């Protein structure tokens, strides 16, 4: 009996998780597994790159969970520095390009997994490709940035373009490297994943850390000096001197191959799949990771979220289904955490504008509390904002900005959202208490109580 062949495009979180799980369920005599990866690394934590650049993680290899050699030892035909340039859906084959030799060839598949990830948003502006301008999506990107810093050790002005997760994390990394840091943010406040009132808290904290954030800044060009390297970032209001520029504008699904062959894409440009992560309308093609859109369980719409947690889950589910098992991915509630120095930032569920976009009426409640009992040493402030549906009181979203112990409290809200709980029901949650860990009333419960009052008042208005 001839073994079936599984071809995987992309050798990071989703792709290698799918390949590894399929291999666990089926041996080489039943399923041949071929993975194409265009980069130099596999199975690494892209989310850890800012902490490696900032020096919190000592070595690049600390971010690598499994090397190509380890994957090959498990019976996976992993082909590094090889880029898939074309998918022939009808012919069930892919064209691959060996980036080292220039050789191209076709490989047939019985089953295909697309795990092409996401690409950094890189505006088509003058000077954007100049030396000293860096994205930070891959380990290669991180290494290039560190090499760039080493080329000019006397230069100490960094400009970060964008103030989302990547932007604020890279601002911290540059600060730790001893740079004067300016963040140019197109939006009203940093962290557009938060409502502006919560983003303002992030802005104030960044200013306190010595990071200058300019909101409403529209970048128009990257200027270069006599040596050809970046020298400044131009905006509509002037320019900001720079010896290195880091792009933190965000990412978009890398679906060039899928788009070329007419595979179904969602409103955000990501591949559309069913619950088993099978591409809609294609029985033998699966997709997962940063190149897909997922169902938002609160909003009832698809969205694009580039997170390693989701990618690994997608890969496990795909591998189980390809390998003869069964698994589904029901959706997400949009939970994310980040930090800039000692400031912790978290959100889950919907922002105000998200709720309005899907036609939900809501109330909000914002409270200030501490992560420990107020009398216990080390108690630090946090602000919690909660959205609840008008009349029903169903929890819609939570945002948290604070110091130590703030961010992971969002997990309580993530579970409540997934369970469809009301804020009234949340007030009775039996959360752990001791003075070193929480006040008698945990900040999440305090916010829920205030939200209950807001719901009741709105219902009688």
Image (cartoon, rainbow, N blue to C red):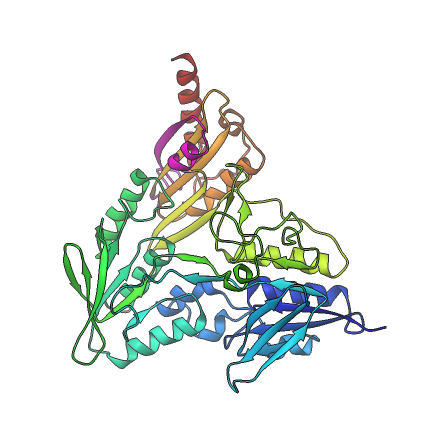
User: Which residue, as the protein is rendered here, is positioned at the far right?
Assistant: 1
Question: Residue 85, percent across and down?
Answer: 54, 72
Q: Residue at x 57, y 57 (%)?
A: 262
Pinpoint residue 48: horizontal percent, then vertical percent.
44, 64
Residue found farthest to the bottom: 101
Task: Give the total of numbered labels.
Answer: 0
The image quarter containing residue 382 is top left
Residue beneath the point at 54% across and 31% down? 429
Instruction: Residue at 14% x, 54% y: name it.
Output: 237
Residue pictured at 32% horizontal, 61% vertical: 123
Whether residue 397 can be seen here: yes
Side of 375 relative to 337 (left or right): left
**Foreground pick, 95 / 212:** 95
Write down the quadrant of residue 332 in the picture. top right
| Up/down of 450 relative to 208, above or below | above
Q: Name the residue furthest left.
A: 238
Farthest top residue?
460
Horizontally, is 309 left or right of 400 in the view? right
Question: Looking at the image, is 269 positioned above or below residue 429?
Answer: below
Q: Where 255 falls versus 98 (above or below)?
A: above
**Quadrant of the drawing holding the C terminus:** top left
Q: Is residue 355 magenta?
A: yes
- Specify start and end residues of the magenta stretch as a single range: 351-380
Q: Position of residue 9 (x, y in %)?
A: 59, 68
The percent coordinates of residue 368 (x first, y second) are 33, 35
Task: In this rendered view, identify the residue nearer to me: 216 or 126.
Answer: 126
Q: Is residue 130 left or right of residue 63?
A: left
Residue 77 visible, this orientation: no
> Is residue 448 in the magenta section?
no
440 sits left or right of 147 in the view: right
Residue 189, located in which quarter of the rendered image? Answer: top left
């Amino acid at each position: 009996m001839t073994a079936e062949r599984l071809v995987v495009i992309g050798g990071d979180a989703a792709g290698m998780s799918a390949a590894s799980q399929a291999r666990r369920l089926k041996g080489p005599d039943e399923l041949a597994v071929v993975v194409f990866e265009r980069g130099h690394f596999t199975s690494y934590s892209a989310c850890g790159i800012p902490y490696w650049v900032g020096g919190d993680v000592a070595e690049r290899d600390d971010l690598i969970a499994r090397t190509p050699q380890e994957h090959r030892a498990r019976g996976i035909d992993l082909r590094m520095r090889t880029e898939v340039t074309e998918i022939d859906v009808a012919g069930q084959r892919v064209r691959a390009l060996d980036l080292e030799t220039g050789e191209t060839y076709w490989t047939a598949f019985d089953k295909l997994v697309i795990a092409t990830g996401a690409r950094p948003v890189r505006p088509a502006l003058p000077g954007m490709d100049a030396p000293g301008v860096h994205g930070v999506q891959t380990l290669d990107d991180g290494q290039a940035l560190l090499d760039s810093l080493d080329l000019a050790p006397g230069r100490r002005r960094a400009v970060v373009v964008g103030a989302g997760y990547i932007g604020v994390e890279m601002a911290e990394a540059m600060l730790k490297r001893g740079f004067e840091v300016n963040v140019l943010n197109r939006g009203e406040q940093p962290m557009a994943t938060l409502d502006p009132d919560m983003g303002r808290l992030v802005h104030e904290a960044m200013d306190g850390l010595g990071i200058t954030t300019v909101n409403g800044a529209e970048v128009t060009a990257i200027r270069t000096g006599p040596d050809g390297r970046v020298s400044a970032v131009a905006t509509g209001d002037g320019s900001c001197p720079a010896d290195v520029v880091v792009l933190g504008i965000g990412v978009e699904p890398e679906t060039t191959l899928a788009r070329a062959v007419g595979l179904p894409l969602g409103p955000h440009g990501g591949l559309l799949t069913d619950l088993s992560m099978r591409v809609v309308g294609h029985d033998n093609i699966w997709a997962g990771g940063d190149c897909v859109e997922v169902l938002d369980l609160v909003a009832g719409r698809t969205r694009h979220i580039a997170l390693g947690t989701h990618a690994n889950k997608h890969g496990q589910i795909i591998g189980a289904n390809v390998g003869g098992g069964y698994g589904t991915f029901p959706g997400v509630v949009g939970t994310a955490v980040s930090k800039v120095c000692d400031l912790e930032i978290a959100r889950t569920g919907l922002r105000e504008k998200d709720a309005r976009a899907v036609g939900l009426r809501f109330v909000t409640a914002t409270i200030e509390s501490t992560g420990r009992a107020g009398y216990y040493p080390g108690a630090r402030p946090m602000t919690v904002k909660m959205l609840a549906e008008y009349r029903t009181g169903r929890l819609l979203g939570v945002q948290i900005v604070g110091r130590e112990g703030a961010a992971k409290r969002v997990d309580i809200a993530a579970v409540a959202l997934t369970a469809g709980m009301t804020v009234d029901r949340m007030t009775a949650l039996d959360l752990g208490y001791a003075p070193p860990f929480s006040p008698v009333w945990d900040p999440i419960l305090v916010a829920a109580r205030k939200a209950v009052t807001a719901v009741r008042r709105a219902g009688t208005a």
